[in-house]
Image: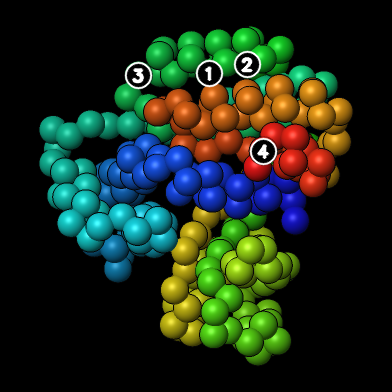
Amino acid sequence: MSGHSKWSTIKRKKGAADAKRSKIFSKLIKEISVAVKEGGGDEESNPRLRVAIVNAKGVNMPKDNIARAIKKADDKDGNNFDEVTYEGYGLNGIGIFVECLTDNLQRTVSSVRAAFTKYSGSLGKNGSLNFIFERKGVFSFSEEGIDIEDLELEIIDAGAENIEIEDNLIIVTTALEDFGLMSKKLESLNIVVESAKLQRIPLSTETLSIDSAKSVLKLIEVLEDNDDVQEVYHNLEITDELMEAYDL
């Protein structure tokens, strides 16, 4: 399992344990808002909105919250968010890619730069991490009631490149261009998807000493706690020793 995917699984557990639902909801509401302003409030004709709703339901966001977010986004006087990305390096050259939705670019870049600086990292130019990450479609859903061998036969033609099981979740990875096809295939199989995202997956991961790795993870957590940040990707190898040392 890739470093980012394992870290995502850990985040999901910690998020539930630490009652960070409000922050998770806030990020998803932003994504719903951008999706509506980009393609309208009808999820049937707006693929991005459909995916945002799937992800909102995956973390048990109430239907009323989702409906309010769509209605508010339809209001022309509502907030407009810019999509912006930042690329940089943490301690010992660990690549870190940050995706943001913000209504104040100056605030966002200042806070992101400050986080990198505080934890011995540095921002780079956009495109500087192209050789480290590739975009993939990543779907996760419960393995309960699913025969993995039958599933593989069903979804291979929809572009499934890799299938993993982690903590009772099935994680399916596809090429970027097969994201929509896989989404429709899983829907046709009546599989309730917990998360469906285009993620930046590291082509390879780097292992650091425990102390250095803990510093990088602290930077990642600080970035993820930033209200303007939607996703943080990295190529740090999350080893069992690191998980134990970081109390994960």
27 sits left or right of 68 in the view: right
Mark 2 or mark 4, whichever is nearer to me:
4
What residue is at 66 percent from the left and 15 percent from the top? 119
* Residue indicated by mark 2: 116
SS of the residue under disc 2: helix
Gap between marks 3 and 4 measured at Cα: 35 Å
The reply to whether discs 1 and 2 touch (Cβ–Cβ < 8 Å) is yes
What residue is at 25 percent from the left and 57 percent from the top? 62
SS of the residue under disc 1: helix
Mark 3 or mark 2, whichever is nearer to me:
2
* Residue indicated by mark 3: 104
Q: Residues within 10 Å of mark 1 (few under 14, many from 20)?
A: many
What's the amino acid at mark 1? Val
* Residue indicated by mark 1: 112
Seen from the viewer's position, the closer of residues 116 and 103 is 116
Q: Earlier in the sequence, mark 3 or mark 2?
A: 3
